Image: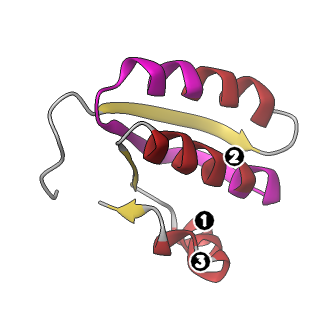
Amino acid sequence: MQKTALHTLCIALEGELDHHNAPALRRKLDAALDRSRSGLILDFSRVTLMDSSGIGLLIGRYKRAKDRGGKLYVQNVSPHIDKLFRMSGLYSIIEKL
């Protein structure tokens, strides 16, 4: 794992990251970003599905973290979701640990 700043929160996501779950997750991640001094690490080891709503959610959280001087990282991304990250260009703004 690469060095990340002190006070970076790690959040384990679980289940489907789709249009049904995105609004509630957005609120929780925004609250976590408000508490974090440097950003978030999102653990995708238990994420089973991600659609375009998930991509939008991540882009929004990236912007929110950046506006606060922090970063957004992902780790333990499954091969299926990794392909989605690569195809969508998310890795150009969100670092994979």
Type of amino acid under label 2: Leu
The residue singled out by tag 1 in the image is: 81
Report the residue at 54% width, 40% height from top: 64
* Label 2, label 3: how far apart the Cα atoms are: 14 Å
Residue 14 % position (x, y): 58, 35
The residue at which mark 2 appears reads as 57
- Is 14 one of the magenta-colored residues? no
Lower position in the chain sequence, tag 3 or tag 1: 1
* Relative vertical location of residue 69 with respect to residue 24 in this rendering, above or below: below
User: CB under 8 Å between callouts 2 and 3?
Assistant: no
Residue 70 percent coordinates (x, y): 35, 42
Marks 2,1: beta carbons within 8 A: no
Q: Which is more toward the observer, 4 or 78?
A: 4
| Nearer mark to the viewer, of 3 and 1 | 3
Stretch of the chain drawn in magenta: 30-55
| Nearer-N-terminus badge (2/1) | 2
The N terminus sits in image quarter? bottom left
* Quarter of the picture holding the C terminus: bottom left
Circle 3 sits on which residue? 89
Magenta highlight on residue 40 = yes
2 vs 1, front mark: 2
Give the image location of residue 19, x and y in percent.
86, 42
